[in-house]
Amino acid sequence: MSETKTALVSGANKGIGYEIAAGLGALGYRVGVGARDGVRRETAVAKLRAGGVDAFGVPLDVTGGQSVADAADLVERRAGRLDVLVNNAGISGETGPGWGQDPTTLDLDVVRTVVETNVIGVIRLTNAMLPLLRRSPSPRVVNVSSSVASLTRQADPDIEVGPVMAAYAPSKSFLNAVTVQYARQLAGTGVLVNAACPGLVATDFTGFQGPRTPEQGAATAIRLATLPDGGPSGGFFEDAGVIPW
Ligand SMILES: NC(=O)c1ccc[n+]([C@@H]2O[C@H](COP(=O)([O-])OP(=O)(O)OC[C@H]3O[C@@H](n4cnc5c(N)ncnc54)[C@H](OP(=O)(O)O)[C@@H]3O)[C@@H](O)[C@H]2O)c1
């Protein structure tokens, strides 16, 4: 079995996903850059390679069954197995003033679109990659969530959690719940499955507002992607440690 470990990062053409790819590449991983736009994907791959990362492009739209199946075929041809899957691709969905999503007037199609990408896309991609992950001696799955998924924090009026986001925040709570179910199902198999919050990061997603850099936002996901055997599974983490559900 090859010594080089292979990682796949969804939505790796920019933002936090790009920096997760760069960080894993710097640790010696061969990195599949999962991205749906060909030009953005190949630009990111070229930039990573210029920085010394063993990167390859993986055409990937997490909302498409055929796209995800093709991505699994490509990773199998390139690497024969997968050691790390980072489900990073995510969207906020359409927002109103101040990035809000008012539950009382919410367009149901916004909810459907957000859940399709942030939750169903993760299940689709994870299940397509699991046969390849099971060939790894130390498989890791990281789901990029958000602290706004924390019902404990959302329900505490003394904690600042930003605007009401009735599609995005629950989609990440749903993702967390799914993460726990995967961890339970895969307990004892060696596959560790965890959720990571990057903090508030200046990317396209936030209109480049936020105190953290994409590199800082990538740190927890990279840590969870490189957990030692016997590490935690079914947890929800940020830089400071465990986030309450
Ligand atoms: N930024 C923050 O403060 C923050 C905070 C908490 C959590 N997060 C989470 O962190 C993750 C990355 O966010 P970011 O800030 O780096 O945002 P970003 O710069 O907007 O990047 C999002 C990435 O996801 C990709 N993507 C979206 N839909 C996709 C689909 N259907 N198939 C494949 N790729 C898709 C985008 O591709 P395109 O370029 O093709 O659109 C892009 O590469 C998201 O899951 C987000 O929810 C971000």
Image: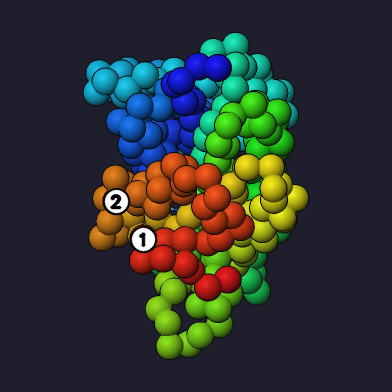
Q: Position of residue 193 (x, y in %)?
A: 59, 49
Quarter-of-image position of residue 199: bottom left
The residue positioned 59% from the left and 22% from the top of the image is 81
Cα–Cα gap, marks 1 and 2: 9 Å
Q: Amino acid at mark 1?
A: Asp
* Tag shown at residue 216: 2
Mark closer to the observer (1, 2): 1
Percent position of residue 130, x then y: 68, 33
In this rendered view, identify the residue nearer to me: 1 or 106: 1
Q: Which residue, given by chain and number where applicable, does mark 1 sit on?
A: 239
Q: Eyeballing the image, is 161 above or below 210?
A: below
Q: Secondary structure at mark 1?
A: loop
Quadrant in which the C terminus is drawn: bottom right
Q: Is residue 225 above or below residue 172?
A: above
In the rendering, which numbered label is found on residue 50? none
Q: Is residue 107 visible?
A: no
Q: Residues within 10 Å of mark 1 (few under 14, many from 20)?
A: some
